[in-house]
Amino acid sequence: MNDVEQIIESLRRKQLRITPQRELIVRALTDVDDDEHQTAEEIHARVQASTSAVNIATIYRTLDMLVEEGLVTRVDLGGGKEVFATVQHGMHMHLVCRQCGHVLDADTQVLQDVRQYLVAEHGFSADLEHISLFGMCEACKQLTSSHEEL
């Protein structure tokens, strides 16, 4: 079963309506490379290639519902840019430079350690499937330190 079928089947099991618009949105969301994320506007553009009958408000409402149902993840990459991916995309972490906006993907093993620590120490079950950490990339750190030396 592919990603589209899995999401549609999950919606059916939850007794949520499968409208043609929702199906188009799910298809647009899943019709990307495995490591690719999309903004609502990018999903809207993909849907618009098929039909102009789906507006951006419908895209946002559907994405909100899919996130709420645990089928899609949303992450903030800074600057008002939110991106979406299906849960089939798997656990992943983005390192976002506050200086230049560059985004790096990082190994998620550390998230498993954090998850275990939070449960053991606080009884807290964290949602760490899709997160962003903000800081400064190596290039910007070097640029900043060279300016400080002047």
Image: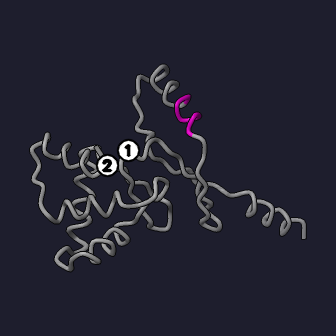
Left or right of 30? Residue 77 is right
Count the numbered circles shown: 2
Q: Residues within 10 Å of mark 2 (few under 14, many from 20)?
A: some
- Image quadrant holding the C terminus, namely bottom right
Q: Which residue is mark 1?
A: 88
Left or right of 65? Residue 98 is right
* Residue at 83% across, 69% down: 147
Q: Residue furthest top?
A: 120
Magenta span = 108-113
Q: Nearer the viewer, residue 82 or 85?
A: 85
Q: Nearer the viewer, residue 70 or 17?
A: 17
Identity, as a three-letter code, of the amino acid under mark 2: Asp
| Quarter where residue 56 is shown | bottom left
Q: Which mark is residue 3?
A: 2
* Residue 15 image point, x, y percent: 9, 44
* Residue at 28% across, 60% down: 27
Most common SS among magenta residues: helix
Q: Do callouts 2 and 1 mark residues in contact (Cβ within 8 Å)?
A: yes
Left or right of 149? Residue 141 is left
Q: Nearer the viewer, residue 91 or 8?
A: 8
Which is nearer the N-term, disc 2 or disc 1?
2
Above/below status of 78 relative to 115: below
Left or right of 7? Residue 125 is right
Above/below status of 26 relative to 125: below
* Residue 32 image point, x, y percent: 41, 60
| Quarter where residue 87 is shown | top left
Q: Tell me the SS state at disc 2.
A: helix
